[in-house]
Image (cartoon, rainbow, N blue to C red):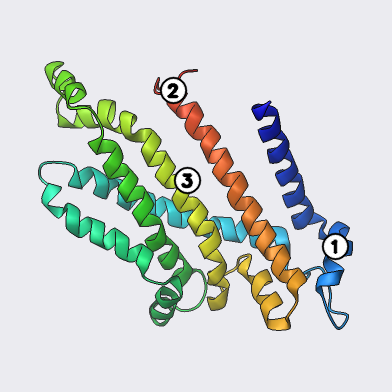
Amino acid sequence: MKLVLANLFRAAALVLLLILLFRTEWLSFLLVPLTSNNAPAVYTQNSLPHLAASHLFLVAISIVGSAVLAILGGIFVTRKSGEDFLPLSRAIANAGQTFPPVAVLALAVPATGFGAGPTLIALFLYGLLPIFENTVSGLKQVSPSVLDAADGMGMNGTQRLFQVELPLALPLILEGLKVATVINIGTATIGSTVAAKGLGEVIIAGLISDNTAFILQGGLIVGLMAVLIYDAMGLIENAITERIGLRPA
């Protein structure tokens, strides 16, 4: 029953997202009451599918960059040679989350100009903490007896890392990736304040023109994308962990 309800929710969310992206006019009867002074109820200044694709492209690029640095950093600070750098690495990752993204944009614009550059920097910094912390936690939770067994089998440090530690830490690392992705899908909307293409354009257009219908459209699309992508990543995580034997099939 739970599986049926989950699948129904996924299907309903996907259908609503597709309608909002490609046939928003079908919902105009719900959006018109949210407008005033005969303002348009449906955002038509730019293609919504194009804005959504640009939005997700920014998120994907930033998450890849964050994942590479955070996972490598997590591996480094859990080795004997790097454990002294854990407090510093954790402080840097935390700074990325605590520093307001608007401030990051303001500081990055003079160096990179308007457009995608400042947004990518802000999203990259925002994605570091959950991936880094989950990588560290995942690697540290590997049982010492498992590590001793790997040493007893004659594995060197590299073999032990890739054949034992990382596979066992994978569920937590993937959870960090999921959280970072959802955070960045929402945060990417601010990129439109510095001329980055994305769904923030719809929300900002609504704020400027006092059009609640536009704000609702942009917010719903971003929210539905975040929910569906998080859910899809969860299914991928389950499939991977089942395949490597960390979850019952």
Quadrant where the N terminus is found in the figure: top right
Rendered view: 214 above or below 241: below
Rendered view: 79 above or below 168: below
Mark 2 residue element:
loop
Closer mark to the observer between disc 3 and disc 1:
1
Contact, mark 2 vs mark 1 (Cβ under 8 Å):
no
Upstream in the sequence, badge 2 or badge 1? 1
How far apart are labels 2 and 1 at the CA level? 44 Å
Please state the horizontal and vertical placement of residue 162, each as a whole percent of the image.
27, 30
Total marks shown come to 3
Please state the horizontal and vertical placement of residue 7, each as a whole percent of the image.
69, 33
- Residue sitting at 24 percent across and 61 percent down? 91
Label drawn at residue 178: 3
Upstream in the sequence, badge 2 or badge 3? 3
How far apart are labels 2 and 3 at the CA level? 18 Å
Residue identifier under label 2 = 247
As drawn, is 152 to the left or to the right of 204?
left
Mark 1 residue element:
helix
Mark 3 residue element:
helix
Crowdedness near tag 3: few (<14), some (14–19) or many (≥20) residues, C-alpha within 10 Å = many
Q: Amino acid at mark 1?
A: Leu
- Residue sitting at 55 percent across and 44 percent down? 230
As drawn, is 39 to the left or to the right of 102?
right
- Residue sitting at 68 percent across and 64 percent down? 218
- Residue sitting at 15 percent across and 31 percent down? 157
Residue identifier under label 1 = 30
Instruction: Judge by depth and name the residue closer to the eye, 37 or 40.
Output: 37
Q: Amino acid at mark 3?
A: Lys
Please state the horizontal and vertical placement of residue 112, each as a whole percent of the image.
42, 76
Residue 19 visible in rendering: yes
How far apart are labels 3 and 1 at the CA level? 32 Å
